[in-house]
């Protein structure tokens, strides 16, 4: 199968490496605004597949669509035309964007994607993405789902860090009892314990996890999304970034708490994942691209909880790709 990758930053490069190492893609066409930098990264990818770097333009992208099996959008700043043109050509799309505005644009392609019988996987990164898969897996044995609370630690490449910086100052919408309720940016301080990490103070952040999860589970009563941030992060979120972002995030984790009913009794399941943020996002994006290319995702535009039929199988695949998955089992307390 032939895949098209737009963007070769921290997440895009990880996605390309995962696709080539899994041998699910025989040819990878990489589009980039910076051909010189892209050629150096392409040379370092290796793998059994054929990698062809291209300069991004509307004409070259349209030409590459013929015979393509999937389009993976990993460049910062979504160009909606790329997704729209791909769906018109009957080619499934996978996007790693975590910008709520861009996610809503992609969700508008739902009707056209269903007519064409292709999938538009929205938010196929660490958060959203891995958070949606963990939610779907944790909720699968429950009879009724009532609450989902997502928290994350760390960012991928520079584009992810800049988006996180901006999202801390933007108003947040939370899902409560069938409607959206606006909350103050960076509010709702909560100490969260992440897998294999120390606890971190987390705050409300303008990310589309809540939107995608609420669409996947219409009967859900309450959903929140928070991210770890320091006092300096919150105070300086209204200013341009004071220091250049790290080329690739070093510490990352996702924690999802799901509450509902099972057999008439209340149940709470806490699951998570940890690893380098770019690796986590790249593994999810590559896994979704492989599934979309082989027609194993539901047709339409939505988050991963809406499109993936067997989240447990996908999580098992991600574990083989290097994603560390954990489940909180509790601990006995021995009296002194």
Image (cartoon, helix red, strand yellow):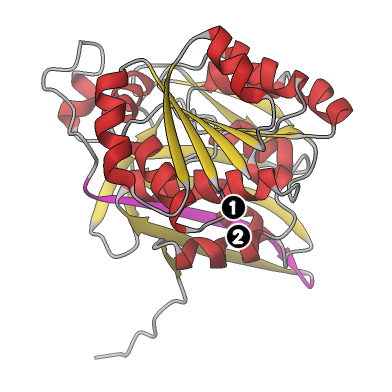
The residue singled out by tag 1 in the image is: 133
Query: Residue 179's x, y, as percent?
Result: 70, 26
The residue carrying pointer 1 sits among few (fewer than 14), some (14 to 19) or many (20 or more) residues within 10 Å by Cα, namely many
**Magenta span:** 250-263
Residue 58 visible to the viewer: yes
Query: Residue 202's x, y, as percent?
Result: 33, 41
The residue carrying pointer 2 sits among few (fewer than 14), some (14 to 19) or many (20 or more) residues within 10 Å by Cα, namely some
Query: Residue 189's x, y, as percent?
Result: 34, 38
Q: Quadrant of residue 35?
A: top left
25 vs 198, left or right, is: right
In the image, is residue 107 part of the stretch drawn in magenta?
Answer: no
Q: Which of the marked residues, 2 or 1, is nearer the chain's N terminus?
A: 1
Frontmost residue, 20 versus 220:
20
Label annotation for residue 314: 2
Question: Which label lies toward us, 2 or 1?
Answer: 2
**Residue at screen point 53% across, 22% down:** 100
**Residue at screen point 58% across, 64% down:** 268
283 vs 154, left or right, is: right
- In the rendered image, which quarter contains the C terminus? bottom left
**Residue at screen point 35% across, 35% down:** 203
Q: Are marks 2 and 1 in contact (CB under 8 Å)?
A: yes
Q: Residue furthest right?
A: 115
**Residue at screen point 26% across, 55% down:** 199
Vertically, is 84 above or below 113? above
Vertically, is 69 above or below 105? below
- In the rendered image, which quarter contains the N terminus? top right
Q: Quadrant of residue 166?
A: top left
90 vs 238, left or right, is: right
């Amino acid at each position: 199968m032939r895949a098209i990758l737009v963007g070769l930053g921290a997440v895009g490069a990880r996605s390309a490496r995962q696709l080539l190492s899994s041998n699910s893609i025989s040819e990878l066409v990489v589009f980039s605004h910076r051909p010189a930098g892209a050629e150096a990264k392409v040379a370092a990818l290796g793998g059994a597949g054929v990698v062809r770097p291209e300069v991004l333009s509307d004409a070259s992208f349209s030409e590459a669509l013929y015979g393509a099996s999937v389009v993976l959008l990993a460049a910062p700043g979504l160009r909606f035309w790329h997704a729209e043109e791909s769906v018109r050509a009957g080619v499934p799309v996978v996007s790693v964007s975590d910008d709520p505005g861009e996610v809503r644009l992609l969700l508008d392609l739902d009707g056209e994607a269903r007519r064409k019988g292709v999938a538009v996987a929205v938010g196929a990164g660490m958060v959203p993405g891995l958070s949606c898969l963990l939610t779907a897996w944790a909720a699968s044995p429950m009879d009724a789902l009532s609450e989902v609370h997502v928290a994350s630690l760390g960012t991928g490449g520079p584009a992810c860090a800049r988006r996180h910086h901006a999202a801390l100052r933007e108003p947040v919408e939370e899902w409560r009892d069938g409607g959206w309720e606006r909350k103050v940016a960076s509010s709702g301080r909560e100490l969260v314990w992440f897998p294999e990490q120390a606890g971190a103070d987390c705050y409300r952040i303008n990310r589309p996890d809540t939107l995608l999860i609420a669409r996947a589970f219409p009967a859900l009563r309450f959903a929140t999304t928070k991210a770890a941030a320091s006092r300096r992060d919150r105070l300086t979120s209204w200013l341009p970034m004071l220091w250049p972002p790290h080329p690739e995030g070093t510490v990352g984790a996702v924690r999802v708490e799901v509450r509902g009913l099972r057999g008439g009794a209340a149940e709470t399941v806490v699951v998570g994942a940890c690893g380098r943020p770019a690796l986590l996002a790249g593994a999810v994006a590559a896994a979704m691209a492989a599934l979309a290319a082989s027609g194993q995702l539901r047709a339409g535009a939505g988050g991963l909880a809406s499109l993936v039929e067997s989240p447990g199988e996908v999580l098992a695949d991600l574990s083989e790709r290097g994603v560390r998955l954990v489940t909180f089992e509790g601990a006995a307390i021995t009296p002194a």
